[in-house]
Amino acid sequence: MFIPTTYTDDTFSISVKKARYVAIQGTQFNTYVTLKLQNVKSTTVTVKGPTPCWEQDFLFETNDISLGLLVEVWNKGVIWDRALGYHYLPLTSVAYNEQESGGRWIELEAQLMMRGGAVVGTTGPTGHSLLLDCRFEPPFGKLLALN
């Protein structure tokens, strides 16, 4: 596994696995996850309970390493949905890997950090966490060169 410094239309793969919530009302949560990269937004199904399990895979194509993935966790409401937390994942921290791993737990935070109208990070821990598996999948030709 290595982290490249440039990408050319590579496939970014992310698996949203499960979450852990710390709130007492977590048993009443009905949550889903949104993933935003550039102008593309993907959403998981809604799952009920304090430890929801999604096991959903998503693919994004990008050629800009300077971007980041915005992960949002929402509690579905009758009228409005409420954000439970955010996490900003810089693409520079994501490695090439042929296979899915067990993933890693990320901490959800309460606020978005903005600069020039764009999200650049998150702050303010919520205590909630999310298990994600993120990787860049090498194109077939690059995969042969690595072996």
Image (cartoon, rainbow, N blue to C red):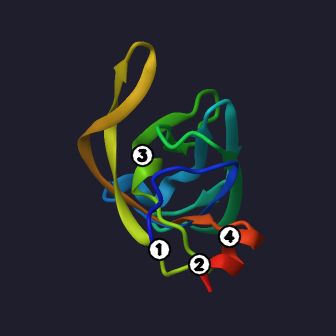
| Sequence-first tag of 2 and 4 | 2
x and y, in percent, of residue 144 in the image: 71, 80
SS category of the residue bearing label 4: helix
Q: Residue at x 45, y 21 (%)?
A: 118
| Residue annotated with mark 4 | 142
| Residue annotated with mark 2 | 100
x and y, in percent, of residue 50 in the image: 45, 64
Residue 35: quarter of image: top right
The Cα–Cα distance between marks 3 and 4, rounded to whole angstroms, is 23 Å
The Cα–Cα distance between marks 2 and 3, rounded to whole angstroms, is 19 Å
Compared to residue 119, the image places residue 117 above or below, namely above
Three-letter code for the amino acid on which mark 2 is drawn: Glu
| CB within 8 Å, label 2 to label 1 | yes
| Sequence-first tag of 1 and 3 | 3
**Mark in front: 4 vs 1:** 4
* Circle number at residue 94: none
Q: Residue furthest bottom?
A: 147
| Residue annotated with mark 3 | 90
Q: Residue at x 64, y 34 (%)?
A: 78
The Cα–Cα distance between marks 2 and 1, rounded to whole angstroms, is 8 Å
Three-letter code for the amino acid on which mark 4 is drawn: Lys
Q: Residue at x 68, y 38 (%)?
A: 41
Q: Is residue 76 left or right of residue 70?
A: right
Q: Residues within 10 Å of mark 4 (few under 14, many from 20)?
A: few
| Sequence-first tag of 2 and 3 | 3
| Residue annotated with mark 1 | 103
| Sequence-first tag of 4 and 1 | 1
